[in-house]
Amino acid sequence: MPDIETLVAFAKPWAKFYSKSSPTQAVLMFMHLAGVLGGGGLAIAADRAMWKARSATDEVRARLLAEVDAIHRPVLIGLAMAVVSGLIMTSADIGTFLTSPIWWGKMVAFALLLANGAWLQSVECGMQRSPSAASSAWAKLVLSSRFSYTLWFAVVLGGVLLKNA
């Protein structure tokens, strides 16, 4: 793996351009925040709906699962926007970010968010394959949605801390 100095030298032309271009900074920050707001907003709304459906009928839960299934794609699009813009912004000051415990904390929270999303989706798929097991799996969905909710806010907190560090 290349050392940090090599990465900084490689990214120097981009870092120089980025530091002098307010429009570029604004577009990338907008793309990053729009991805987090769009994807995270939909995910948090779905998380809340799952909590509320804990005591709902199987029919209501089945409809909710269909809605949540339709939300995965826009959430992933939002995440992709945030990842691409985040990588581009990180490369503009790679030496600072790669040595920042706050940045690494945000990346850990983001990795946990992705892992939790994969777990949530696997539980949902299992419920769709075997509707008879849906009631017992609902507790896993609620737990996953609680993790999701917390991790989305942890990622945002990490971004705020980075911006103000």
Image (cartoon, grey):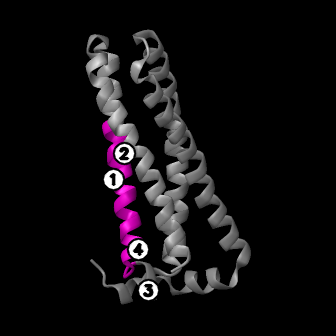
Q: CA distance from mark 1 to mark 3?
A: 27 Å
Q: Residue 102: where, in percent of width, then height?
A: 41, 73
> Magenta region, mostly helix, strand or loop?
helix
- Residue marked by disc 4: 102
- Residue marked by disc 1: 112
**Which corner quadrant holds the N terminus?**
bottom left
Disc 4 secondary structure class: helix
Q: Residue 79: where, in percent of width, then height?
A: 50, 50
Q: CA distance from mark 2 to mark 1?
A: 9 Å
Determine whether 114 is above or below 68 in the image. Answer: below
Q: Which stretch appears magenta?
A: 98-119
| Lower sequence index among marks 1 and 4 | 4
Determine whether 73 is above or below 95 in the image. Answer: above
- Residue marked by disc 2: 147
Query: Within the image, what quadrant is residue 124 found in?
Result: top left
**Amino acid type for the residue under numbered disc 4:** Ile
Determine whether 123 is above or below 32 in the image. Answer: above
